[in-house]
């Protein structure tokens, strides 16, 4: 017995030492390994981010300024702060020494706090004593490059990977991106034939000039250089075949294109302004769009009654709603794409609609959409329109949501299957492409007027100098699109993740049900209140003595009845709210029972069953040995 006990304890000790040894070995050999079992793959690095990390040539320093102690008292921030730190540490580990991460907790009035401010990380005041909370990231490269995320907004946590990957990419590629800009609208300024004066560049064009190196293309351009990061097309019309072919070949090389097309461009100054009725103010690039799998009808305008803006047509007349001029809020803007997420409102005028062509092998993702209270109208109805209210005569919404802007990606075919158009000669040794060698990245909007100043900025006079103040997010929309497309294809492929906070779906469902019941009861109370007030007014009008202040028995009875009804309904409202709390508590109790009792019990039962099965397994005697039963059988036979 003693020998068996000693062997048993020796086996336990050996197993314990083996377990400890394996734990130490795995901690070193499997460092950085992880198994992501979350529903939305929250902890899996995108392949695009991995490729960006591998493209780093010179070391990059990242400075994560995080007030960890202060975050302990902010439950909305602390888990996200830990998530950001873990994510940055994983990036540094994957970068093979090319990223040096510095985690800094700035103390009030310290050198670290000054350093954060110097690098562009802003602090949020915590109290009147001057203490600030820091939660941002700054980066520097081996030269003088510097980028920063001033503050990690928890509401934008789905774009954590994209924002950090973009910062790293900009530090690894500090040169200004080259953008080729082709516009048939007077965006760049110059002489205005209608006013006879010189006009300044549009505000959105001025903003782009500050951030990028812009090359202006003419409608008869014959080539697009290999250094062009983004091709911008604004109201492309009357493009020469050679220009269309150059755009086609750029797209097939995996080009990044930002396009604005329009069925009725209000800023189009071509033609005689006195004969604008019936003038062709639509964009024409159908041949290219069809090759890219996008359907755009230049003869239809989306009229949306739900998003119609109120405009004043003439001085002295009351403003009217114009279903052709739309103010699109967050409900119409995709919150899962970096181009439109976070924008407050975007204004458009006489916008068209986009759709994927059936059978096209592209990915078509809507960025801007109308409401269901929308209808397609002929573009001619909006030319020389004197009364926008007339558009609502006979308005019949289709119930469909029309796409006004979209992101298109994928491998596409050429728009010139028969080869280069007449007059185009390729350099020696160069052949025209028939299909994509890299995926096309296209962001397209079915409106050009959203670029115009009047739809999103006010001009102010500050000491004799013009200053523009934005009242809509049109400029941010364009800069977001340029910022996204000006990065590499790897950066564009980095997806926006789902939120890290998981909602309590069943609790929210219970709350919605209770709120619906509460709202119904509240409406009933308001209706009974109105009916009672009407009855009191009727009784008051039938009184003989108008100056009397003593209530009649009928009035007193009615008031008593109303008070009783009001108390009864208030009790029912409290019962609804109590039922909500009770249902949530019951759900919480069920979860506790499952986690604390049921799951451990099932685990213990499974362990007992496995143990019982092992004890009931027959013991096989060792080879060459003699069991007790064999000895007994021999004795019986002898």
Image (cartoon, rainbow, N blue to C red):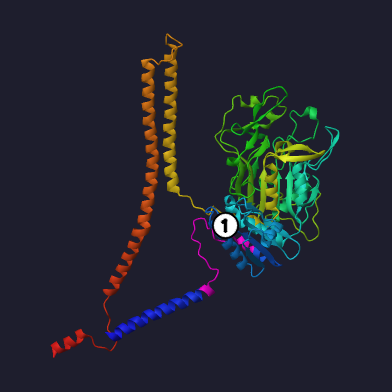
In the current view of this chain or complex, which residue is farthest to the top?
544
Residue 306 in the image, given as x and y percentages of width and height: 59, 33
Q: How many marks?
A: 1
Residue 561 coordinates in the image, percent (x, y): 36, 23
Which corner quadrant holds the C terminus? bottom left
Q: Quadrant of residue 394?
A: top right
Q: Nearer the viewer, residue 558 or 361?
A: 558
Location of mark 1 (residue): 70
Q: Is residue 453 above or below residue 154?
A: above
Front residue of this view, candidates 34 and 432: 34
Q: Nearer the viewer, residue 579 or 478?
A: 579
Q: Quadrant of residue 284?
A: top right
Residue 410 visible, this orientation: no
Q: Nearer the viewer, residue 463 or 85?
A: 463
- Left or right: 291 in relation to 184: left
Residue 60's place in the image compared with 75, above or below, is below
Classify 10 Å Cα crowding around label 1: few (below 14), some (14-19), many (20 and above): some
Q: Please state, as top left, top right, bottom left or bottom right, where the N terminus lies in the image.
A: bottom left
Q: Position of residue 436 (x, y in %)?
A: 67, 55
The percent coordinates of residue 388 (x first, y second) are 66, 26
Name the element at disc 1: helix
Q: Residue at x 41, y 77 (%)?
A: 16
Q: Is residue 220 magenta?
A: no
Quick check: is 28 in the magenta stretch? Answer: yes
Dominant secondary structure (helix, strand or loop) of the stretch shown in magenta:
loop
- The answer to whether residue 337 is above or below residue 609 is above
Q: Kindly tell me whether residue 526 is visible in this rendering.
A: yes
Q: Is residue 49 above or below residue 422?
A: below
Q: Specify the farthest residue to the front.
A: 129
The residue at 81%/30% (across/down) is 272
* Magenta residue span: 27-51
Q: Could you tell whether 596 is left or right of 372 in the image?
A: left
């Amino acid at each position: 017995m003693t020998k068996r006990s000693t062997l048993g304890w020796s086996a336990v000790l050996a197993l314990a030492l083996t377990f400890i040894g394996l734990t130490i070995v795995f901690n070193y050999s499997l460092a950085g390994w992880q198994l992501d079992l979350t529903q939305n793959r929250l902890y899996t690095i995108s392949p695009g981010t991995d490729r960006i990390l591998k493209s780093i040539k010179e070391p990059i320093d990242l400075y994560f300024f995080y007030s960890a102690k202060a975050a302990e008292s902010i439950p909305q921030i602390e888990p996200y702060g830990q998530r950001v730190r873990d994510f940055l540490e994983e990036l540094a580990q994957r970068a093979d020494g090319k990223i040096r991460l510095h985690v800094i907790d700035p103390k009030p009035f310290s050198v670290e706090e000054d350093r954060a401010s110097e690098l562009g990380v802003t602090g949020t005041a915590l109290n009147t004593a001057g203490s600030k909370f820091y939660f941002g990231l700054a980066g520097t490269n081996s030269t003088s490059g510097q980028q920063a995320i001033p503050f990690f907004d928890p509401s934008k946590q789905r774009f954590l990977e994209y924002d950090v990957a973009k910062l790293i990419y900009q530090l690894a590629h500090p040169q200004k991106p080259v953008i080729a800009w082709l516009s048939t609208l007077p965006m760049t300024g110059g002489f205005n034939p209608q006013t006879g004066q010189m006009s300044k560049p549009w505000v959105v064009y001025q903003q782009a000039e500050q951030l990028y190196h812009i090359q202006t293309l003419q409608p008869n351009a014959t080539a697009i250089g290999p250094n062009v990061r983004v091709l911008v097309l604004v109201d492309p019309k009357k493009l020469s075949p050679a220009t269309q072919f150059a755009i086609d070949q750029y797209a097939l090389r995996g080009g990044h294109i930002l396009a604005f097309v329009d069925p009725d461009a209000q800023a189009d100054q071509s033609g005689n302004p006195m004969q604008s009725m019936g003038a062709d103010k639509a964009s024409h690039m159908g041949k290219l769009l069809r090759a890219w799998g996008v359907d755009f009808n230049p003869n239809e305008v989306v009229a949306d009654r739900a998003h119609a803006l109120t405009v004043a047509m003439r001085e002295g007349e009351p403003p009217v709603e114009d279903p052709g001029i739309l103010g699109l809020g967050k409900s119409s803007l995709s919150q899962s794409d970096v181009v439109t997420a976070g924008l407050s409102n975007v204004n458009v005028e006489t916008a068209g609609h986009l759709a994927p062509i059936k059978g096209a092998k592209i990915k078509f993702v809507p960025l801007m959409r109308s409401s269901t209270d929308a209808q397609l109208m002929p573009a001619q109805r909006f030319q020389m329109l004197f009364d926008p209210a007339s558009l609502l005569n006979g308005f019949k919404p289709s119930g469909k949501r029309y796409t006004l802007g979209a992101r298109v990606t994928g491998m596409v075919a050429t728009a010139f299957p028969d080869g280069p158009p007449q007059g185009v000669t390729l350099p020696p040794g160069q052949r025209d492409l028939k299909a994509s060698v890299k995926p096309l990245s296209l962001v397209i909007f079915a409106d050009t007027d959203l670029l115009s100043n009047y739809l999103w900025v006010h001009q102010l006079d500050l000491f004799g100098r013009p200053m523009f103040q934005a009242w809509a997010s049109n400029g941010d929309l364009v800069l977001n699109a340029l910022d996204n497309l000006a990065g590499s294809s790897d950066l564009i492929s980095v997806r926006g993740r789902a939120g890290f906070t998981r909602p309590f779906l069943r609790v929210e469902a219970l709350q919605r049900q209770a709120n619906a019941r509460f709202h119904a009861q509240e409406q009933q109370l308001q209706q009974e209140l109105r009916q009672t007030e009407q009855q009191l007014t009727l009784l008051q009008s039938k009184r003989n003595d108008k100056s009397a202040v003593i209530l009649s028995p009928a009035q007193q009875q009615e008031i008593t009845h109303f008070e009783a009804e009001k108390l009864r309904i208030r009790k029912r409202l409290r019962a609804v709210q109590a039922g909500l709390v009770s249902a949530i508590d019951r759900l919480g109790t069920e979860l506790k029972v499952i986690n604390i009792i049921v799951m451990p019990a099932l685990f213990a039962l499974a362990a007992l069953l496995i143990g019982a099965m092992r004890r009931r397994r027959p013991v096989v005697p060792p080879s060459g040995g003699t069991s007790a039963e064999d000895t007994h059988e021999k004795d019986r036979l002898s």
